[in-house]
Image (spheres, rainbow, N blue to C red):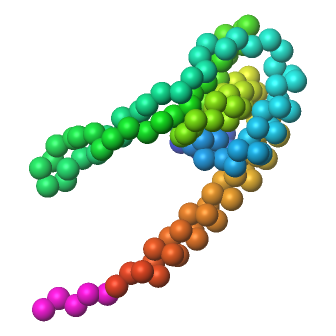
Amino acid sequence: MFNEANGGNGQDRPGHAEALNLLARARPEGLKALAEQLLENLGDISVIENRTGLVMVPMRDTVENVDFHLGEVLVSQAHIMDPSGHVGYGMVTGRDLERAMAMAVVDLAMAIDPAAAPISEFLASERDHLARLDDARMRRVEATRVEMETF
């Protein structure tokens, strides 16, 4: 199926876990447009599940070394399947069932053809966009850093 490391193909294509992470953080407009484009070629698909729910956020107290739940996060999830048994899954934070379904459609299309050009191009574009956002965030954090002297 998918190699979790880097696609297992010697190319710069992401593995399945990284692809799902990129899709979950992708800009909604582009994700939905890609799903619409891919949906035309998927034929009949069955919706197994499309709903919202709460996911517990686990944390670890590093002093006591115990796990606890920080709280819950509202998520939307979609689970679909094509007639040949390929499955697609999408989960995003918030109450956007359409976005979760779009993610599931793209995941299903990746299961059928992992090397599909529109998907690879979209993932590369989103990887670059998210890297720029993360870099900008880290620059803002770095600007607040204070050097402390130890007495």
* Image spot of residue 13 (x, y percent): 68, 44
Q: Residue at (57%, 28%) from the top-left corner? A: 77
Res 81 quadrant in image = top right
Q: Residue drawn 33% across and 41% down?
A: 71
Front-most of 151 and 85? 151
Displayed quadrant of residue 55 = top left
Is 146 placed above or below 12 here? below
Extreme residue in the top direction: 83
What x and y, as percent, mark residue 14? 63, 44
Report the predominant secondary structure element of the magenta stretch.
loop
Which quadrant is the N terminus positioned in?
Answer: top right
Quadrant into which the C terminus falls:
bottom left
Which residue is nearer to you in this view: 125 or 103? 103
Q: Give how far across and how far down residue 28 sits, in percent.
A: 71, 44
For the point 50% across and 70% down, which residue is it?
138
Please tell me which residue is depicted at 43% across the width and 39% down the height of the picture.
73
How far across and how far down the image is residue 63, in percent? Answer: 14, 55
Q: What range of the chain is rendered magenta?
A: 147-151
